[in-house]
Image (cartoon, grey):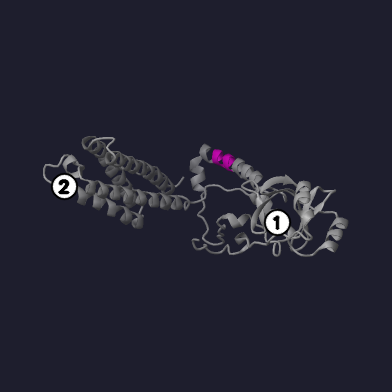
Amino acid sequence: MSMTALLFAFAMIDNLLLLFINIYNIITLSDLEIDIINVRQACNKLNQTFLPEVVLHIILTVFFIFNNNWFIFILNIVLDLWFAYKYFKRQPGQLGFYDPLEINNRRNIKAHMKDFLIRLIFYLLCFLLYLFFFDIGPILMQQSFPLSTNITMFELLKMTANVGCSLLKIILENPIKARQNAQEQSSSGITYAHKLNKYAFYIDWYNHTIEDIDRLYRALNDIANLRTSFRQKPVRLKLLTLITDQTLIDNLNVISSQPGTAIYNKSLECICIRCKNGWIGFQKIAYRKSMYARDFQNGYISKIDRFVFDSIHNPLFDHIYDRRLPPS
């Protein structure tokens, strides 16, 4: 692991400690505000955490100097200067950084609570920043491997975990050689994954092909079921079935060519749904409650002349992987 990666790993651990200290201080002030503890007990607790917080943050700031991370150094030195300003601004004869006489006022309690909340947010944002920079070091080892055509997300997760563990074992056995063969991450050819939201699980029957729906199912079904809607109510689709019988497909095409049309097939025991380029089946449907295809046929499809699911836009198929998406 490079020195940069080690630095940001230490920075994340350091920031977690600072987060815990500020959460502890916020809880202490809350206890004081509702009279669970008295003001002297509260100040003793706050003073016990002040020096560790300052030391942890100064160490972090100094480390960023030696690593030439000037932006993050300036970001952190501002808080160090604030600590120094608050310390030297103390009243003469004040006991510790937090004094019972000074803090024994509801307005002062609110002011200190605000300070702790601001620092808590600052440390949280810094933690996310360090987490981002932690992944910018050189690549110590990488390996390509073949994927089967019908692999699911969970299967891919297990496969990559096994490969990652084997590579990590090799690196730990000879870290010096791994660092010597390290390669910098390329700045070209970068792609960005879409952020998952509830619409990522919906099927757009007019625009999604059989292949699109199959890939979507294999990618997301281990997280949550694919969805559609009927009369503006969500419907969850379970147990996907690919329809390969050409005779059956021809018979379904005779009945309807409208995307979203749902037809029950007794031989496959599934609900066949028309998409952009053909038909795809699901053996279980959850509409109000989960049920098998035959029950859904008897309860809903058979009572309507033409049962058609709604098409809902899915942002995962907006193919813009060459740039970052704006926050939604």
**Which residue lies at the image location 71% right of the left edge and 59% below the top edge?**
309
Examine the rendered structure and indicate whether residue 160 appears above or below residue 189.
above
Q: Which residue is mark 1?
A: 213
Asked if the magenta segment contains residue 46, the reply would be no
Residue 66 seen anywhere in this rendered image of the structure: no
Residues shaded magenta: 164-170
Q: Which residue is mark 2?
A: 90
The quarter of the picture where residue 202 lies is bottom right
In the image, residue 166 lies at what x, y percent? 59, 39
Disc on res. 82: none
Instruction: Give the left or right position of residue 41, taking residue 295 as reference.
Output: left
Q: Nearer the viewer, residue 63 or 148?
A: 148
**Which residue lies at the image location 62% right of the left edge and 60% below the top edge?**
314
Q: Nearer the viewer, residue 152 or 289?
A: 289
Q: Secondary structure at mark 1?
A: helix
In the image, residue 47 lies at what x, y percent? 24, 39
Q: Amino acid at mark 2?
A: Arg
Instruction: Give the left or right position of residue 97, taking residue 288 as reference.
Output: left
